[in-house]
């Protein structure tokens, strides 16, 4: 276990890196995707039905088995200021809001998840994704789902060295409910090669979501406290 | 003059309680317990029991005290089961683990519905088998400790609790195995008044000499105590047989560590002392040929599991051949042989392929859930020049092999890594079991759609 023993303080530290020069980026075609997965340089696991799941330049991602449903009743607004706690009472209030805002439900295989119009639900992909230092990912909806009003990701970039499930932010932009089943292919991941010379080594957890096992809420204030506090 | 509540006859009281329990059952429909079909099974079983109880309440006479009491007892039991469903939430512990467990045990327990739930306590695994007077199926609540829901490697100990389930549901066959197991030992007692190989007083003297027990109870209680211990030893054997080598480190971690090495020989009425259980397990693991380090000729997997074996053997050897070695090796072998006839695949632990376990362990080293090993031909890294689709298709892996890989990885890492590493290995294994369920669900689609 190479990185199990890292100090907690290092976990969540965002590795400094700039956006790679777009001139050096190229999308990985199917053959290269397969070669990298087979050689275990890239992990997208499990690929249950490779013939359908691996496209010309992307890999389809499936819906996982849990969901965080964002509820309006627990918190009247998303106010970054409430994320900054000065004392234990504020910390407790923030934690309460955070946990009550997100209702966690399990959706076993064979069951379904109904996404109502205008709702927001965070779900994990079934696949575990581990990127090497020279690949960056981009997640988008499968076009057929997009046409039904389903948006799967608003934070679509997956950084190099990322290791974990990918959280999809599902939203129904249509007017009628959408029923989703765990295991369905709902998103696709394209991978872009970036210049290895410009890439940082994968020597620490690269973001607050690294080694994620399930969808979680994030910290929207981190590093921006100066703009939020009076 | 209107009757008051306290003037209800016993029969009317039962009717009132019956209605209350019925309403509680309807309330459970607010909650989803496990998968949809499982919820339906529980609801239908409880409804059936209520219907039958309704008929029986209609027939019982007000003066039939024992009949009324039995119906009251049935209603109380049903009420507790229904409350358990209300208290069961999908997120309380690793449900894919429970699903995988149900899949391998379903054939042996075809007439049982397992109700999984979580409770407080640090290592409070339990099983509460029932023998209901009404209904079509039995409902056995299975308890996991809430605090360690993610620690699937420790959940391996639940194999012991399934031993209790087996004893209740297959008492005749397995009762013989219990008798074989303790035959000729100080635990072989029968209720007083019948011929015994060992007198209850001998058992008391053994407890007095080795466990510091000073107060003697009557012969009946001593016999019941010895029988209880014999069943616990059987359940250890059963757990080992169905969960495989992972049972040993889970057993050690959960039972030895909390005793802090001082309670290994403490007298606890409900269970045999840790020293006795450990020595019995050592003999059993040898009889079942699951002690890889002692197998001949050694294979790759034997090398991998050596660390697990060594840790357990080191502990058990402290008491081996001492006063806690009360079971006869020959009897353990016979009991194991009898049990193997009952615990046929998929219930029995399947022997893993060494290459597959190595791949699962490599995944854990890479911090990737150890799911669905690739075909061996893909392991050469840069040599894959013209990859085909088949190279990345996952194979099916038994969840017990995932657990074995997890324990082996921890054995490999524990010298240099901290507790967070153990937690991560557990979470990776739990995640892999969930992913494996998806693979199996997909592969079973022709059968589902047929």
Image (cartoon, coloured by chain):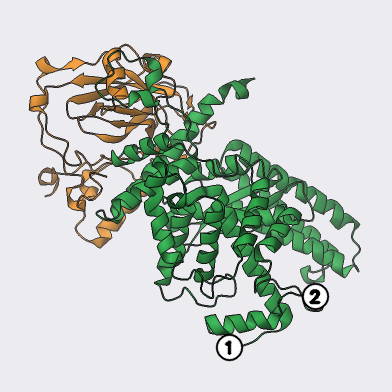
Separation of marks 1 and 2 at Cα, in angstroms: 26 Å
Q: What letter labels the chain drawn in orange?
A: A
Marks 1 and 2 in Cβ contact (< 8 Å): no
| Chain B drawing hue | green
Viewport quadrant of the C terminus of chain B: top right
Residue B328, given in percent of the width and then of the height, sits at: 61, 65
Residue on which the image places disc 1: B214
Residue on which the image places disc 2: B195
Provide the chain ID for the residue under circle 2.
Answer: B
- The verdict on a common chain for dots 1 and 2 is yes
Q: In the displayed structure, does residue A33 sit left or right of residue B92?
A: left
Can residue A173 be seen by looking at this rendering?
Answer: no
Judge by depth and name the residue closer to the eye, B411 or A33: B411
Give the quarter of the image for residue B201. Answer: bottom right
First along the sequence among labels 1 and 2: 2
Can residue A41 be seen by looking at this rendering?
Answer: yes
Q: In the displayed structure, does residue A208 sit left or right of residue B399?
A: left
Q: Secondary structure at mark 2?
A: loop
Residue, x 34% and y 24% (percent of image)? B378
């Amino acid at each position: 276990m190479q990185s199990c023993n890292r100090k907690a303080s290092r976990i969540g530290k965002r590795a400094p890196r700039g956006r790679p020069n777009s001139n050096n980026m190229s999308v990985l075609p199917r053959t290269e995707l397969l070669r990298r997965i087979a050689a275990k340089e890239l992990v997208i696991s499990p690929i249950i039905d490779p013939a359908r799941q691996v496209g010309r330049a992307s890999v389809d991602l499936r819906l996982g088995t849990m969901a965080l449903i964002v509820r309006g009743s627990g918190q009247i607004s998303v106010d970054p200021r409430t994320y900054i706690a000065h004392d234990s009472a504020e910390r407790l209030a923030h934690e309460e809001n955070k946990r009550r805002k997100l209702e966690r439900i399990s959706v076993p295989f064979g069951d379904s998840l109904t996404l109502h119009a205008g709702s927001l639900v965070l779900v994990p992909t079934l696949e575990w994704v581990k990127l090497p230092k020279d690949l960056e990912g981009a997640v988008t909806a499968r076009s057929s789902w997009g046409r039904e009003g389903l948006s799967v990701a608003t934070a679509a970039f997956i950084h190099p060295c990322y290791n974990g499930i990918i959280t999809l932010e599902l939203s129904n932009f249509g007017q009628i409910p959408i029923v989703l089943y765990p295991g369905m292919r709902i998103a696709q991941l394209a991978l872009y090669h970036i210049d290895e010379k410009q890439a940082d080594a994968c020597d620490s957890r690269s973001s607050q979501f690294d080694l994620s096992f399930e969808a979680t809420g994030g910290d929207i204030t981190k590093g921006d406290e100066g703009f939020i506090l009076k | 003059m209107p009757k008051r509540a306290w003037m209800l006859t016993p029969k009317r009281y039962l009717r009132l309680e019956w209605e209350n329990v019925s309403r509680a059952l309807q309330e459970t429909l607010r909650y989803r317990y496990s998968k949809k079909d499982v919820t339906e099974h529980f609801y239908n079983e409880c409804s059936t029991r209520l219907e039958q109880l309704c008929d029986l309440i209609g027939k019982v006479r007000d003066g039939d005290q024992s009949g009324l009491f039995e119906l009251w007892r049935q209603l109380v039991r049903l009420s507790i089961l229904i409350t358990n469903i209300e208290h069961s939430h999908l997120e309380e512990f690793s449900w894919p683990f429970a699903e995988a467990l149900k899949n391998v045990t379903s054939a042996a327990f075809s007439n049982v519905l397992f109700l999984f739930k979580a409770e407080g306590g640090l290592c409070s695994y339990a099983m509460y088998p029932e023998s209901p007077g009404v209904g079509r199926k039995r409902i056995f609540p299975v308890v996991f400790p809430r605090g360690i829901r993610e620690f699937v490697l420790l959940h391996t100990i639940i194999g012991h609790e399934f031993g209790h389930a087996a004893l209740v549901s297959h008492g005749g066959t397995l009762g013989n195995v219990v008798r074989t197991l303790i035959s000729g030992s100080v635990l072989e007692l029968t209720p007083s008044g019948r011929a015994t190989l060992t007198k209850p007083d001998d058992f008391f003297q053994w407890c007095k000499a080795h466990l510091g027990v000073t107060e003697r109870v009557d012969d009946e209680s001593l016999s019941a105590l010895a029988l209880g211990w014999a069943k616990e030893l059987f359940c250890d054997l059963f757990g080992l047989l169905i969960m495989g080598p992972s049972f040993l480190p889970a057993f050690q971690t959960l039972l030895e560590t909390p005793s802090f090495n001082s309670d290994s020989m403490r007298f606890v009425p409900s269970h045999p002392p840790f020293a006795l259980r450990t020595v019995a397990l050592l003999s059993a693991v040898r009889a079942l040929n699951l002690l890889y380090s002692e197998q001949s000729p050694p294979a790759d997997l034997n090398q991998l599991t050596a660390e697990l074996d060594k840790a357990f053997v080191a502990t058990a050897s402290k008491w081996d051949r001492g006063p806690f070695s009360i079971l006869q090796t020959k009897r353990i072998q016979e009991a194991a042989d009898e049990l193997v006839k009952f615990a046929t695949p998929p219930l029995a632990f399947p022997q893993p392929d060494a290459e597959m376990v190595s791949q699962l362990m490599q995944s854990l080293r890479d911090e990737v859930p150890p799911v669905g090993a690739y075909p061996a031909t893909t392991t050469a890294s840069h040599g894959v020049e013209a990859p085909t689709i088949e190279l990345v298709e996952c194979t099916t892996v038994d969840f017990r092999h995932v657990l074995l890989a997890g324990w082996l990885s921890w054995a490999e890492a524990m010298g240099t890594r901290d507790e967070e590493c153990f937690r991560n290995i557990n979470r990776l294994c739990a995640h892999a079991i969930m992913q494996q369920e998806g693979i199996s669900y997909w592969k079973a689609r022709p059968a589902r759609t047929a």
